[in-house]
Structure formats: structure tokens, C-alpha cells
Image (cartoon, rainbow, N blue to C red):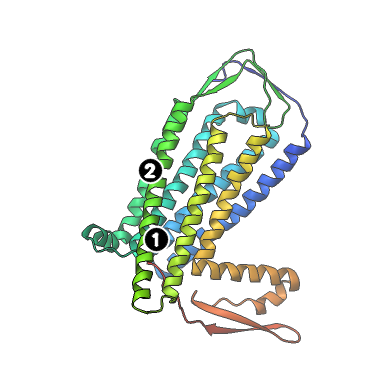
Amino acid sequence: MEDQGCNYQRAERFPLPVILYIVCTSIEAVVGMSLNAFIAVVNCIDGMRNGHLKSIDKILTAFGVSRCFYMCLLVIKIFWIAFFPWIFEYTSLYQTYKATTWFLNCTNLCFTACLCTFYCAKIANFQHYIFFLLKTRISRLVPWMLLASLLGSLATTSPFFKEIYIFTCQNYSSFDILGNVTLEGFTVETDLVHLFLWCGLGFTVAFFISTTSTFLLLFSLWRHTQQMQNSSASFSSPSMAAHFQAVKIIISLLVINVINFVSLMVLLSNRFLDSSLASRFCAIILNACPSVQSSLLIWGNPKLKREFGRVVHYIRYMFLFGKGVMRDAFCLPSKMIGSVSCIPNTHSYSCNPEVRQVTHEELH
């Protein structure tokens, strides 16, 4: 994209709403990057320790890496907004940022579809040859599913560089997100037909796979509970509780993906100026979704939840008692399934490792 000789004028003034917006998005970026990096690091360490990554860990690691890249993109945008807003909004970086934003969000939708398909194949029980074949081969299909997600997202991203945004130079004045940049002779036209066609295609395919897998999983669990009730058997087993918890997380991810997609479409369609309240509100919601999704994934995974609790425990006692006490209060067991109990005494903390019985059924 060429600038075609358009002139840019900048005023060195930061309104209070812009400062608040930058602070809010910066906090979202730090929290989101920390949570997603935690997911990726814990799974990678566990993979190096065991010599391989479990199938569920591959999907969660892909989630974490994708969301980390999106948070890095958000940090770059904050930097450009604060120092070079006229360059970011009205040069070739405009197309690149919009395209990258959609690509990372589309991969997140596809990874959600992979997670739903994996849970459905592992948990649901249907007496059909195709479903039995999927259940036995799902672990080997996970890498190919992730690769297909990346290729599909890339295919729906390519039109951003050719068909969606049209740049022209005319006598025109506008305001950027700072509300203090005047542009002479520059306009951006958005082809909404191509935008909603390609983005809608990517969202519809991923959302259809996710909802279909979730429906099959819910139907299978409902039928299983009905059979156990008719046979006067107890269905409050740890495995059933874990299965219902997985369903709750999947449904929550789907709801967040819908909110994320609506907010993203508002921003990509350029129906509002970046300095408008609607754009900033949608941007805040969009940037908060990765943190909420990561929190759900950590809460629903026993290994991530256990390790996250240990990290929080370490940080809390480090601030309360200092690093010297933490050498005694924070003990790393040899295996991740072990737990550590720290018993305070008069002067320091002593750690007694205890072996915990694994009561849940981990998915492989």
C-alpha cells in the first residue's frame, strides 16, 4: 500500500480518556501474556520431562502460544498509539495489523473447535464405526488438526491485503485514537461484503464444529446419566464430575468466542472512529477475552490448576516474608503429581512433601 503523498499533522497532546485506555489495555496485555505464557511453559516443561506432549497439552500449548502472540501484538499497538499514531493508522502497518489480528483470533476459534472435538471423541460414547475410529485415532489426528487450523486461518486472512481495505487520497480530515491527528487527503474504505464473507466463513466453520461436538458430548452424557439413574447406580463419580466440568468449560469458551467475534467485527469494519467510545469499549472487551479464556483453561485442567496455585503461593510468600524464607517455604517435588504442604513454625517454614492420590481421570 502506498501513502500517495498524503500529508500528516500531529499534535503532541494526550487526552485523559486516551491515557486511561492505554493503561487499561496495558494491564490486559500483561495479565493475558502472563497467563498464556504460563500455560505454554508448564506444558513444555512437562513434555520435556516425560519425553512427549499429551494430545490435550498440545492443544492447550497451541492456545497459549497463539494468545501470547496476540498479546504481543497488543503491546506493539499500544507502543504505536503512544508514540507514532499517525504512522500506525495510515500506512501499510494498518493492513498488517488488521490482518494479523484476524489471523490470531481465527486460530483461537479453530483451536477451540479442536478442543471440543477432542473432548467429544474422548468422553462421548456412540456405537458407530466412524465414531469408534475417531476415538481410537484422535490422538494421532491432533497435530494435523492444529496444522489445518493454521492453514484455514491463513486462507481467510489473505483477502485483508487485497480486497477488504481500499486507500485513497482526497481532501479529508479525521481524528485518530488520540483525537488530535489531522489527515489531509486520506481515506480508508472498507469492503464490508468481503470482510463479512471471509471472516464469517472462518467463524462459521469453526463454530459449527465446536457446537456440533458440544451437542454430541452433552447428548452422550445425558444418555449415560439416564441409564445410570434407571439402574439405580450412582453417577457422582470423580470421572463424571471431570466430564461435566469439561462441558462447562467448553460452553464458556464458545460464549466468549461469540462475544470476541462480535467485538472484532465492529473494529475491523471501521464503522466507528478509533477515538469513539464504541471502538474503545469493543477493544477493551476483545483484549480481555484471552485472559478469561486462559483462566478457564487453567481452572479446568488439574495439572495447570495445581501448578498455578503453587506459583501464586510462591509469589504471595515472597512478598510477605522475602526470598530467604521462600527457600524453606517453597519446595519443588520431583514429580508434578506430588503436593507440598508447608507447616509454619516459630521462626521459619518447613516443607513436608506428601504424595497425593490422583482421583481424576486425565485425558490422553
Which of 63 and 83 lies nearest the eye of the viewer?
63
Q: Residue lying at the far front in this picture: please name it.
A: 230
Of residues 131 and 36, the one nearer the viewer is 131
Taking the spot 31% from the left edge, 56% from the top edge, the residue there is 141
Find residue 349 and report its horizontal and vertical position in percent.
69, 82
Query: Residue at horizontal 74%, vertical 42%?
Result: 20
Residue contact at pointers 2 and 1, CB within 8 angstroms: no
Residue holding disc 2:
205
Where disc 1 sits, the SS reads helix
Q: Position of residue 54 (x, y in %)?
A: 39, 64
Q: Report x, y in % for residue 234.
A: 41, 79
Sequence order check, earlier mark of 2 and 1: 2
Above or below, 181 against 67 in this view is: above
Instruction: Please state if 15 lies on the left or on the right of 307 as rendered.
Output: right
The quarter of the displayed image where residue 225 is located: bottom left
- Report the residue that reaches farthest toward the top: 171
Outermost residue on the left side: it is: 129
- Residue denoted by label 1: 218
Residue 47: image quadrant is bottom left
- Disc assigned to residue 363: none
Q: Tell me the kind of residue under disc 2.
A: Val
Q: Is residue 321 above or below residue 18?
A: below
Does the rendering let one see residue 48? Answer: no
Q: Residues within 10 Å of mark 1 (few under 14, many from 20)?
A: some
- Marks counted in the figure total 2
